[in-house]
Image (cartoon, rainbow, N blue to C red):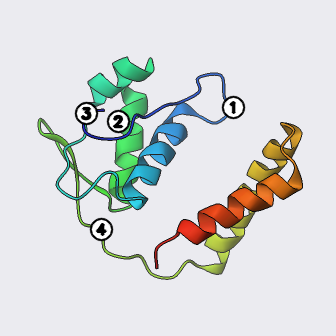
Amino acid sequence: MAGSPRLRIDLDSPIPATRQIADGLRVQLVEGALRPGTDLPSVRQVAMELGVHFNTVAEAYRMLAAEGWLDLRHGRGARVVERKPPAAASRMDLADYRRRLRELISQMRAGGVSPARIADELRSFAEGLQP
C-alpha cells in the first residue's frame, strides 16, 4: 500500500482474512499511519497483493466504514475520514475485548511466550497509548 505501512495477513491463520485485513488497517488508523484524506488502494489491488478474493477486502473496508473510519464511494474507492470519538465502551464491549485479549494471551502462551514477556509487551503497548 503506497505511502502507508505494509498490510500483511496469514492465510493459514484460523482468523478470517477479512478480520485480519480490517484489524491491520485499524491499527494503522488508530496509530495515525493512515490519516484523514488518505485514499486507500483499490479493493482489487489489495486483493491481488494479499492473494485473496476482492470481496474479502471489500468486506473489511465496509466494516471500517461502519466504524466511521472510511468513506466509501462507488468508482472513487475508500478514503480515510476524520472520525468522531466514540462513546465510552459498554460493559458488553469491555467483556468482549477482555475475552479476545484472553484468547490472544492463550495463543501467545501456547506459542511459547513467557508470562513475563507477555506482561512486558502489554506494558509497552499501554505506555505508547495516546490520551
Q: Nearer the viewer, mark 3 or mark 4?
A: 3
Report the Cα–Cα distance between label 4 and label 2: 20 Å
At a point 40% along the width and 39% down the height, the residue shown is 59
Whether pointer 3 and pointer 4 mark residues with C-beta atoms closer than 8 Å, the reply is no
Instruction: Describe the element under mark 3 as helix, strand or loop.
Output: loop
At a point 35% along the width and 58% down the height, the residue shown is 32
Label disc, if present, on residue 2 of the rendered structure: 3
Instruction: Describe the element under mark 2 as helix, strand or loop.
Output: helix
Residue on which the image places disc 4: 83
Residue on which the image places disc 1: 14
Mark 3 or 4, nearer chain start:
3
Which x, y percent locates residue 87? Answer: 45, 81
Mark 1 or 3, nearer chain start:
3
Q: Nearer the viewer, mark 1 or mark 3?
A: 3
Q: Nearer the viewer, mark 3 or mark 2?
A: 3
Which amino acid lies under the numbered mark 4 shown in the image of this protein?
Answer: Arg
Vertical placement of 49 versus 75: above or below? above
Nearest the camera: 32 or 52?
Answer: 32
Which amino acid lies under the numbered mark 3 shown in the image of this protein?
Answer: Ala
Q: Is residue 107 left or right of residue 123?
A: right
| Residue found at the far left of this picture | 75
Whether pointer 1 and pointer 4 mark residues with C-beta atoms closer than 8 Å, the reply is no
Which amino acid lies under the numbered mark 1 shown in the image of this protein?
Answer: Pro
Whether pointer 3 and pointer 2 mark residues with C-beta atoms closer than 8 Å, the reply is no
Q: Quadrant of residue 57?
A: top left
